[in-house]
Image: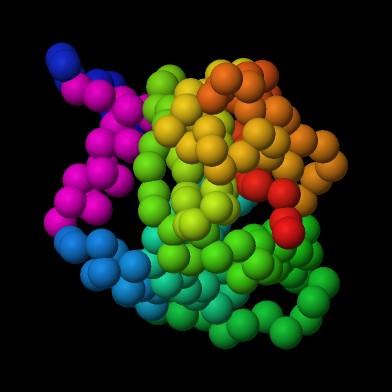
Amino acid sequence: MRRPARDGEQTGAEAFRKAIEELQGLYSPSVTFSLLNLLGSHDTPRFLTLARGDLSAMRLATLFQMTYPGAPSIYYGDEIGLKGGHDPLNRGAFPWDESQWDHDLRRETQRLVQLRKERPALRRGTFEFVHAANEAVAYVRELNNEIVLVALNAGQGTCRLDLDLSRWRTAATELIFEGERGSLMVEDGHLRGLELAPRSGRVLATPRP
């Protein structure tokens, strides 16, 4: 359960954006691009345990991890939904019996790792938020003529985003959905009608050469 907000305190997407921008402000860009980004480690309870088994939280967090500047690192077993509380439960043996694995989560993790490999902007590109309101955020990674737009909806309802991409209007007039069919047009510097299902994220990018 979320802690009630204090007077004047930002919550939801606004608080997330503020936290990330403050984190980035602590280091020079060269350091940010070298930092090891973890969702869990041998020093903490496993992410899925902290999220009370919420797989949608795990998927959203993994999507952010794989599209954020730095060096993403997967703690063994997180990719198949391994749980574990405080030490030593967070260091449990890897279950080699594949019937115990969450194969959907593993495939999604593999897809995002492959996407990061295929899109240089996700590894070396700039990072900038273009939306942060209620429970949804969107940000752009840019490198040379490639842009990747990532949108996350942590809310319980479907949301529709209209985004101002005028800063990048020379980079693309069309963005294709990564991992799914279809595309959206960027008209007059704006991308309109991006729909996000509850507790989900989508990635769009410039067409591949």
Q: How is this picture coloured?
A: rainbow
Closer-to-camera residue (35/190): 190
Q: Is residue 104 left or right of residue 3?
A: right
Tell me which corner region of the image, top left, top right, bottom left or bottom right, holds residue 5: top left
Residue 54 spot, x, y in % from top left:
58, 45
Start and end of the magenta stretch?
Answer: 9-26
Residue 19 spot, x, y in % from top left:
26, 42
Q: Is residue 149 magenta?
A: no
Closer-to-camera residue (31/85): 31
Which image quarter holds the C terminus? bottom right
Q: Is residue 57 left or right of residue 12?
A: right
Vertical position of residue 141 compared to residue 33: above or below: above
Vertical position of residue 157 compared to residue 140: above or below: above
Q: Is residue 36 left or right of residue 72?
A: left
Residue sitting at x 44%, y 65%: 124
Q: Main secondary structure of the magenta part?
A: helix
Tell me which corner region of the image, top left, top right, bottom left or bottom right, holds residue 161: top right
Which image quarter holds the N terminus? top left
